[in-house]
Amino acid sequence: MKVVSFHSWGEFIGDPEIKTLQKLEEWIIKRSLSIDPSRHQIFGFDNPVPQGNEKGEQFASKENPYGYEVWITIPEDYKIEEDLKIKKVESGLYAVVSVKSVMDIGYGWKNIFDWIKNCEKYDFHPKWKGITKYYEKETIEHGKIGLEHHINYPEKEIDKMLMEIYAPIIEKK
């Protein structure tokens, strides 16, 4: 798929997500786009992931910021301003789980990890180790990134935001 990419850095959990979605929204308003799910889907992911402490809890600070990247899919022939980042995303196989609130994202990721760990047919993609350093490529190879698909964008109430979580997988041999 072809996407326009937006990225921001943040100093606390939730900060870069808000900033990046604001950039996306400003671009959509500027272009007077109507978000048609058959033409435009919204995906996001940590880039890079927040650091974790010894308890496994994620944190961010001025000294240890993390980033969030958001994509909007566009048709191949869509005209784009020169200063935006355009990326090509390779297709591939994903395990997917739906969540009904931003507050359920952690639970959704845990469920998908547990399912893959216990699955007889599929395994984690070997390239997927979490992005620990800022990842900036024009072509995104399958397996590198797990995604959060924002189903009912532009919903802003965190308890009403529907999302699908995509974890890259491969068939076991």
Image (tube, rainbow, N blue to C red):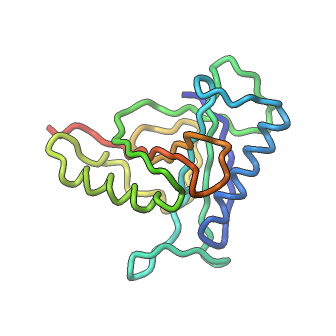
Residue 46: x and y in percent read 54, 56
Residue 155 relative to residue 112: left or right: right
Q: Residue at x 81, y 44 (%)?
A: 26
Q: Write down the quadrant of residue 63 in the picture.
A: bottom right
Residue 8: x and y in percent read 69, 57
Q: How many marks?
A: 0
- The one of 83 and 38 positioned closer to us in this rendering: 38
Q: Residue at x 45, y 38 (%)?
A: 141
Residue 153: x and y in percent read 63, 42
Residue 122 relative to residue 36: left or right: left
Residue 102: x and y in percent read 54, 57
Image height check: is 72 above or below 125? above
Q: As drawn, which residue projects farthest toward the right?
A: 30
Q: As drawn, which residue projects farthest toward the top?
A: 77
Q: As drawn, which residue projects farthest toward the bottom?
A: 54
Q: Write down the quadrant of residue 93 in the picture.
A: top left
- The one of 96 and 4 positioned closer to us in this rendering: 96
Image height check: is 148 above or below 65? above
Q: Residue at x 79, y 40 (%)?
A: 27
Q: Residue at x 76, y 48 (%)?
A: 23
The C terminus appears in which quarter of the rendering?
Answer: top left
The N terminus appears in which quarter of the rendering?
Answer: top right
